[in-house]
Image (cartoon, grey):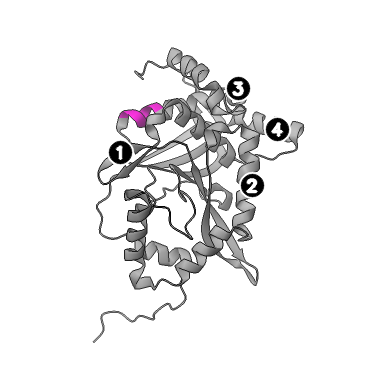
Amino acid sequence: MKHLKLSRIKKLTTYQRLAIGSWKNAKDPSIYHWSDVDYEKAQELTDWVLKEKGIKLTPTYIISQAVALIFAVRPQLNTILRAGVLYQRDEVSISYMVAITKKDNPKKFNLSNCVVHGVTKLSLIELYQKLKEKIIETKEIKSESIKSQNNLLKKVPTFLMSYFLDLTAFLLYTLNIRLKGVPYDPFGAVAISNLGQIGVENTFIPLIPYGRVPILIAIGLVKPRPVVNENREVVVKDMLRFCVTINHRYIDGKSLAVMQEMMGFVFKDPKRWLLPAPKDIKEEFTEEFYKNFKISN
């Protein structure tokens, strides 16, 4: 007698097949952390950009630029693990999850990702333009690398996906070999997903074993929340919630604490810190930050 009555699901999405091949038994170095930041001044910045540039910025762009600035100030965060040894990356890249809806059935969608390289060299407006191009390219599957990647994944049986992903990660990252049909550094040093745009308030993204990404950020909702101000009064403010998953093999608790403080500091004056390219203001930001926070560098 069968224990459960089961029916096999024959048509799996690419994401489902990747997920099946990715996660096995739990040997998980994850650290989980979430923060609420005051979004009032960031909203003023987005309103100003919309008025002056005609560009509508979402929290994705604001968080991305803040992350790029933090990485410019603390390049020791921008590492990759190869055969048990940490290596410094030469440039900072951020990847983004993109939902691709099916033309014949808009209610069904698949997940893909795109990546923006060299984010510390981009101003906020340049990052917006670059990411917008990448998202359009990914959704319309215009990129030859995306087409090649999708075609390659379709050929791999689900029961072999785990071995395929492990082998691909070994070649790409451990041996540092560029593979035909696989995009350059497809996951970068940080992966960001804006789940607030689909109404998700609070969630964490699991580590991507084959992607070697040390930091994953899930952006939640901007919504009114009760906050205790400096006068110990409870006030209501528009707060942005974001949840962070960190690979403890790459980043320790002290680095996480510094990142949290830096993120809060950025949101106190986002127009000053987020409009320029991070590489152009990293010394100024470092000096101002350590005046206010007594955390050793």
Does the magenta run of residues contain 103? no
From the viewer's perspective, is 122 left or right of 159? right
* Nearest-to-viewer mark from 1 and 3: 1
- The amino acid sitting under disc 2 is Lys
Q: Position of residue 161 (x, y in %)?
A: 36, 67
Which mark identifies residue 132? Answer: 2
Pointer 3 local density, CA inside 10 Å: few below 14, some 14–19, many at least 20: few
C-alpha span from label 2 to label 4: 16 Å
Are the two marked residues, 2 and 4, in contact with CB atoms closer than 8 angstroms?
no
Quadrant in which the N terminus is drawn = bottom left
Q: Which residue is mark 3?
A: 272
C-alpha span from label 1 to label 3: 33 Å
Disc nearer the start of the sequence (1/2):
1
* Nearest-to-viewer mark from 2 and 4: 2
C-alpha span from label 1 to label 2: 32 Å
In front: 118, or 209?
A: 118
Are the two marked residues, 1 and 2, in contact with CB atoms closer than 8 angstroms?
no
C-alpha span from label 2 to label 3: 23 Å
Q: Which residue is mark 4?
A: 49
Disc nearer the start of the sequence (2/3):
2
Which stretch appears magenta? 254-258
Q: Position of residue 194 (x, y in %)?
A: 53, 47
Quadrant in which the C terminus is drawn = top left
